[in-house]
Amino acid sequence: MTEIEGARPEGDRAQYGVLVVDDEEAILESIEMTLGTEYRIFTATNGEAALEILDHESIALVISDQVMPGMTGVEFLERVVEKNPKAIRMMLTGYADMSSLIRAINDGRIYRYISKPWEPDALRVDVRRALDAYALAARNVELAADLEVANERLRAENLYLRREVEGRYSFSEIIGDSAAMQKVFDITHKVAETDATVLITGETGTGKDLIARALHYTGPRKEARFVAQNCAALPETLLESELFGHRRGAFTGAHADKKGLFELANGGTIFLDEIGETDPSMQVRLLRVLQDGEVRPLGSSETVQCSVRVVAATHREIRREVDEGRFREDLYYRMRVVEIRIPPLRERREDVPALAHHFLDKVSPRMGRKLTGFTNAAMDRLIAYEWPGNVRELENEIERISALAGHDDEAIGIEMLSEHIRGPGPGSAIGLSPPSAVPERDMNRAVDELKRDMIIESMRFSGSKTRAAERLGIPRQSLQKMIKRLEITQAELAPVEK
């Protein structure tokens, strides 16, 4: 087993042990260089050696190659589940073997897979998110224990309910490891810390409501109320009363004063779903609220000040609505301080397996079924299907299957899928096409030659391995390993006389 010694990891993340398993030394070196300054890195060239490390070291994250001699990556990850079920598991894959990937997701319970070659920055982000999930799970366990002790007191019960709501609508509960969703998470994490007005766009069923709630429950207003209103669900008069409130006698049936949602959400967040369905007169009133921070209830001559964060959403092409005169341009720019587009599920098919398992885990126990996974054929069809209803349609499909499944069924087969899903589909749109036929050895040789040139240049310029490692941004031990593996001689490293 190996652990980085040359550049000690620093900061809070130094406590995490990361185990990397690959039969190629160059891959291990590359990952050591990428992650070694932040985490404790352990490496092994086969599954048996890696299992020995798991027996003696505290490992939070396991990164395993898919194809290795002896024990395969999938078999190794299955053993990891048995030995250390809390460790996050990720898989390296050099080609799209759908059967192995599906088995890894089902049996190895991988957090995600990483295609070779990878970008170092992308790998750092993937590892950071994985370890954040690991830390969150650990914190949740601790919190559950604390809440159990204090469960008899009302204050503890209220705290538990609040934490439960925040956890349910935090970004960590929104499933999506695709590049498109990572971009969404990057924007939402940044804007959640602010009070900026947000416009969420995307097709019906993509999860705009979840993003809106996560913005609130991870932001500075999370202690206050979150209220939501679908603007397409009520006619204009009732919507106006619902949002701004009314005074007694304002209209027939107004027998008492009523506070509107803006006033009820004071200090918190109001979510205006389907904002694109509002009439021009309502758009004028909404613009006034955003500009002045005050509302006027129906039948009142006085205004009420409200400090409310506004998050809106629409499935329409709102820019086109503006161009065609159906939506006010000034309101559009007021709402669109930050725009977050949620991609449809067909644009992030790699998220389908994780979403399907998430929904199955949620509904199967509720339906009294023993369903624990999917056959390869069934998962292939789920990935290939277009999902016009997006994530909501996928959730409904899994719930339908669970309700109709037999009590003895353990896995969802292709025959259990709806007819329109199991039928012929765009197999080419799976999003996991075979890599180009690039000669692997030639690519590795080119990378090694680049490493040689950079090492020789840095050593000649710096004069010492320590300074050369700092200049290259890698641990000193990794530099020593590469010098030895690449057979770089001392004469090549000697400074050039001027």
Image (tube, rainbow, N blue to C red):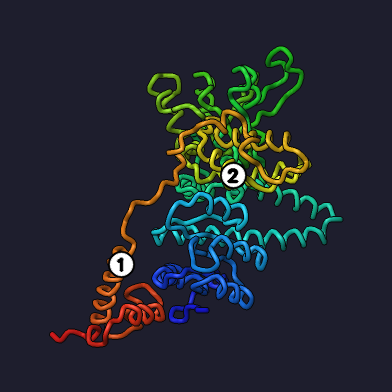
Does residue 414 sit above or below 175 in this rendering? Answer: above
Which comes sooner in the sequence, label 1 or label 2? 2
- Residue at 30%, 63% in the rendered image: 443
Which quarter of the picture shows residue 140? bottom right
Q: CA distance from mark 1 to mark 2?
A: 37 Å
- Mark 1 lies on residue: 447
Q: Does any portion of residue 405 appear in the rendered image?
A: yes
Image quarter of the C terminus? bottom left
**Which residue type does callout 1 highlight?**
Val
Residue 2 relative to residue 253: left or right: left
Tell whether label 2 touches label 1 (CB within 8 Å): no
Relative image position of residue 88 (x, y in whole percent): 59, 61
x and y, in percent, of residue 2 in the image: 50, 79
Q: Is residue 272 above or below residue 118?
A: above
Q: Residue at x 46, y 68 (%)?
A: 35
Tag 2 residue: 355
Name the one closer to the observer, 497 or 385. 385
